[in-house]
Image (cartoon, rainbow, N blue to C red):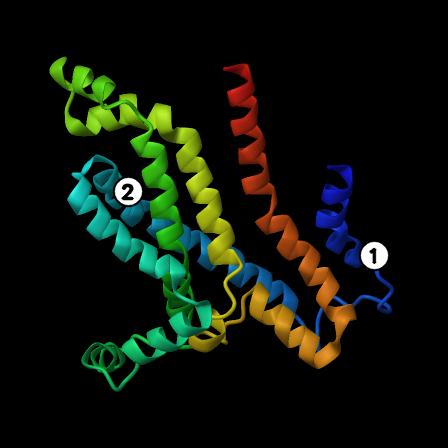
Amino acid sequence: MFVFVLALLYPLSGLGARVGRWQWDGIIPGSTATAVWNSLSLTAIALAVDVAVGTPVAYYLARSGCRDRIVWEAAVLLSVLMPPLALGILLSLAFGPQTALGAWLLRVGIPTSNSPLAFATTQVYASIGYYILAARAALAAVPRELEQVAALLGSTPLQVFWRVTFPLAKLGLAAAVSIAWVRALGEFGAVVVTAYYPSGMPVQIWINLQDAGMPAVLPLLIVFLLTALPLPWLIHLLAQRRNVSA
């Protein structure tokens, strides 16, 4: 087991490789700090959309009949299985000026590519399926009998959710949020097609690699890892701790 873990974590040793003196930016001053801000702020917006839209969908899937659940989960799963590059190309076409929707959005002054809106929208499409599937599993694990008892005692559906369902599913929902966060923050293949500008961290890492090499990549890579990894890692540890204590 030790050898396996050592081999699994070995790529992290690349952070200590000798690549020359590190530089914070590539050839454009301020590009790295801007990329960090773009990624964090726009990913937060995308994540809020994932939770606001995905939670009701996940709850419906968790409580719907078997036949309905299979049909709708298949649609959600399709978005998860979509290759990122294919997703980016399809989004650029579907929201491009050659379609009725894309032409209308451009007429009313809403840019459908290379804009913060395009960036966040692409992140939502790339991550919401992951959130829904993970949230559905968390909500489905809550015994329906407890919800029914709360309803019989006079609680409204919203009260049942906040007083019964959410407390029992909150750790699983937090895991769903962390999965969606990592998926949205790390999206490159789709975003590079729809929103090369404004550059987020994945795209800026690629730009720095092309323009200035590894010395300009590693500082941003460290920031990228520190913003992507801790949340799901801590949630996993909390889940394991709760399982052990149970």
* Quadrant occupied by the N terminus: top right
Residue 96, position as x, y percentages in the image: 30, 81
**Badge 1: few (under 14), some or many (20 or more) residues near its Cα, within 10 Å?**
few
Residue sitting at x 21%, y 45% = 69
Which residue is at the front of the view, 115 or 239? Answer: 239
Amino acid at circle 1: Gly
Q: Is residue 31 visible?
A: no
Residue 221, position as x, y percentages in the image: 68, 60
Q: Can residue 1 be seen in this view?
A: yes
- Label 1 to label 2, Cα distance in Å? 42 Å
Report the disc number at residue 58: 2
Write down the quadrant of residue 101 in the picture.
Answer: bottom left
Amino acid at circle 2: Ala
Mark 1: secondary structure: helix
Residue 180, position as x, y percentages in the image: 44, 50
Residue sitting at x 46%, y 38% = 175
**Badge 2: few (under 14), some or many (20 or more) residues near its Cα, within 10 Å?**
many
Residue 62, position as x, y percentages in the image: 25, 37
58 is higher (above) or lower (below) than 41? above
Left or right relative to 199: residue 205: right
Write down the quadrant of residue 146 in the picture.
Answer: top left
Report the disc number at residue 16: 1
Mark 2: secondary structure: helix
Which residue is at the front of the view, 38 or 140? Answer: 140
The answer to whether the residue labelled 1 contacts the one labelled 2, judged by CB atoms less than 8 Å apart, is no
Left or right relative to 39: residue 73: left
Which residue is at the front of the view, 43 or 2? Answer: 2
Write down the quadrant of residue 22 in the picture.
Answer: bottom right
Residue sitting at x 55%, y 60% = 37
